[in-house]
Amino acid sequence: VQLQASGGGLVQAGGSLRLSCAASGRTFSSYHMGWFRQAPGKEREFVAVISWHGVTTYYADSVKGRFTISRNNAKNTVYLQMNSLKPEDTAVYYCTATSRTIVDTRAPAYDYWGQGTLVTVSS
């Protein structure tokens, strides 16, 4: 699976952005899909994950209630709607995919990573 993330940019605090991740391959619907992020000087951290059928989602506490992950299996695309953005959300956001059975929030569980898209939130 190849992943291509897009939608990053510069936004003021309180604003919104929607990230998209387009996946290649015909087995997209069998993968759990996640978003991670890495801020400058910090370790990569989990943001959100959605199960292959879209029924199960998990979020990091820091984004719960502000971010929404969704997917469209017909379009091989996963989305991250980010509202009420804060300067601390500034990071490179990575789209990921895993073929494992469980819906995991740990980075090592993910087999495939996109190139990342930069989100900058100004105060």
Image (tube, rainbow, N blue to C red):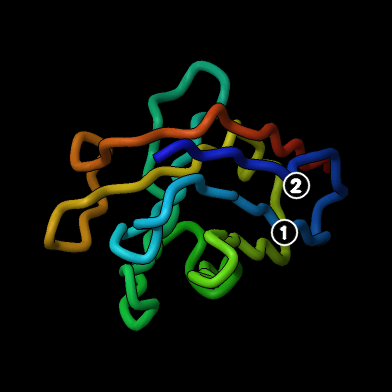
Kind of residue at disc 2 = Gly
Q: What's the residue at 55%, 27% (across, down)?
A: 115
According to the picture, the residue beneath numbered tag 1 turns out to be: 18
Q: Is residue 79 above or below residue 65?
A: above
* SS state under label 2: loop
Q: Position of residue 109 (x, y in %)?
A: 19, 42
Asked if residue 16 is positioned above or below residue 37 in the image, the reply reads below
Q: Residue 2: percent from the left, percent from the top?
A: 46, 36
Q: Is residue 103 left or right of 82 when viewed as pictured?
A: left
Quarter of the image where the N terminus is located: top left
Could you tell whether 22 is left or right of 46 in the image? right
Q: Where 65 sits versus 49, above or below?
A: below
* Residue drawn at 65 percent across, 65 percent down: 81
Residue under pointer 2:
7
Query: Residue furthest toward the left?
Result: 101
Name the N-terminal-most of marks 1 and 2. 2
Q: Nearer the viewer, residue 44 or 54?
A: 54
- Give the camera-side residue of 54 and 93: 54
Farthest residue to the top: give it.
41
The amino acid sitting under disc 1 is Arg
The extreme bottom residue here reads 55
Task: Tell me: residue 96, above or below residue 118.
Answer: below
Query: Which residue is depicted at the point 81% across and 52% down?
Result: 13
Which quadrant is the C terminus positioned in? Answer: top right
For label 1, the SS is strand
